[in-house]
Amino acid sequence: GNSGFLKPHPGMFRDIMKCAGVPAGRTWVIGDGRTDLEAARRAGARSVFLTYGLGNMGDEKPDRICMSFWELLDLFP
């Protein structure tokens, strides 16, 4: 369903974590834009920025930065 929240509001990610029963500290948000990273931070989740996406990270400080799909896969063996 639609939670009614739009990024960078953290509500969407909080709803997903609650439904999945996964705490924020064990949640990763993978995104290619500032709003993805901001929403993750505001929800207390970790974040990965994909440099090959459409956006930019602005002033956000992701936990990880990946420059390829293969680099992203190496984060989650």
Image: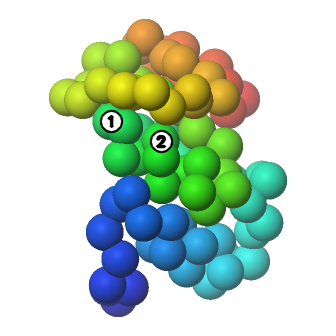
Spatial distance from mark 2 to mark 1, Cα to Cα?
7 Å
Vertical side of 22 occupied by 2: above or below: below
Is residue 41 placed above or below 73 in the rendered structure? below
Q: Which of 76 and 55 is in front in this view?
A: 55
Query: Residue at (53%, 18%) from the top-left corner?
Result: 65
Whether residue 18 is situated above or below residue 24 in the rendered picture: below
Q: In this view, does 15 lie to the left or right of 49?
A: right
Say whether marks 2 and 1 touch (CB < 8 Å): yes
Q: Determine the residue positioned at 65% across, 29% down.
A: 63
Neighbourhood count class around disc 2 (C-alpha, 10 Å): few under 14, some 14–19, many 20 upward: many
Residue 55, by quadrant, is top left
- Determine which residue is flagged by label 1: 33
Q: Quadrant of the C terminus?
A: top right
Mark 1 crowdedness (10 Å alpha carbons): few <14, some 14-19, many ≥20: some
Locate residue 76, reporting x and y percent. Answer: 67, 32
> Callout 1, which amino acid?
Gly
Q: Which residue is under mark 2?
A: 37
Does residue 3 appear in this view? yes
- x, y percentage for residue 7? 35, 60
Q: Does residue 14 lie above or below 35 as drawn?
A: below
